[in-house]
C-alpha cells in the first residue's frame, strides 16, 4: 500500500512540476508584458538528445523550475515544424534566446546543453541584466 501511495505522489509531483511551455512568441510577448516576466525561447528538434536532457534533467530540477516559473515565460519551438522568427538564429539545438519583459533582446543566446549548475548561472545573469 505504501508503494502505491508513494507512486501516486511521485506521479502527481511530476505532473505538476513541469514547465507550461507556450508555442507562440507573440503570445509570450503579451504574457511577459502583463506579468512583467522575461521570455526564454527554446529552439529544439524532435530527435535532439541535448533537448531531451534539458527538458528531462535540467528543467526538472526544483530550483531551476522555480526560477523559470517565477521569472520567465517559456517558449518552445521545433525548428523543423514551427516558423522561427528571422531574428532568432541557431547553429544547432538546443538553442536558447532570452528577451526582457519589454521584448528587447538581452544579448543572451545559448547554444547546446548545459547542466543544472551552468544553466542556473545563466538564468541569474539574465535576471541581473535588466
Image: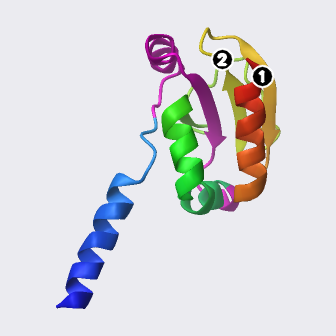
Whether residue 1 sits left or right of residue 80 in the image: it is: left
Does dot 2 land on a helix, a strand or a loop?
loop
Q: Is residue 97 above or below residue 106?
A: below
The magenta stretch spans residue 35: yes
Disc 1 on helix, strand or loop? Answer: helix
- Give the residue at x 45% y 32%: 22
Residue 50: image x %, image y %?
A: 70, 58
Residue where numbered disc 1 is placed = 129
Of residues 23 and 66, the one drawn nearer to the viewer in this rendering: 66
Real-space Cα distance between discs 2 and 1?
9 Å
Residue 73 visible in the current orientation: no
Residue 75 numbered mark, or none: none
- Please name which of the two marks, 2 or 1, marks the residue nearer to the observer: 1
Residue with the most extreme left position:
1
Residue 6: quadrant of the picture: bottom left
Quadrant in the rendering for residue 99:
top right
Magenta stretch contains residue 23:
yes
Image: magenta residue range = 22-50
Q: Is residue 8 visible?
A: yes
Residue of label 2: 100
121 relative to 103, above or below? below
- Image position of 59 with respect to 26: above or below: below
Residue 56 location in percent, x, y? 55, 61
Amino acid at each position: 500500500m505504501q508503494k502505491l501511495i508513494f507512486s501516486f505522489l511521485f506521479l502527481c509531483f511530476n505532473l505538476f512540476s513541469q514547465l507550461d511551455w507556450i508555442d507562440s512568441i507573440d503570445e509570450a510577448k503579451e504574457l511577459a508584458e502583463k506579468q512583467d516576466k522575461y521570455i526564454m525561447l527554446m529552439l529544439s528538434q524532435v530527435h535532439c538528445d541535448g533537448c531531451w536532457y534539458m527538458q528531462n534533467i535540467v528543467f526538472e530540477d526544483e530550483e531551476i523550475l522555480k526560477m523559470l516559473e517565477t521569472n520567465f515565460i517559456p517558449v518552445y519551438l521545433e525548428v523543423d515544424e514551427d516558423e522561427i522568427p528571422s531574428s532568432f538564429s541557431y547553429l544547432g539545438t538546443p538553442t536558447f534566446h532570452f528577451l526582457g519583459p519589454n521584448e528587447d533582446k538581452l544579448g543572451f543566446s545559448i547554444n547546446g546543453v548545459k547542466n543544472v549548475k551552468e544553466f542556473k548561472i545563466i538564468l541569474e545573469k539574465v535576471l541581473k541584466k535588466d
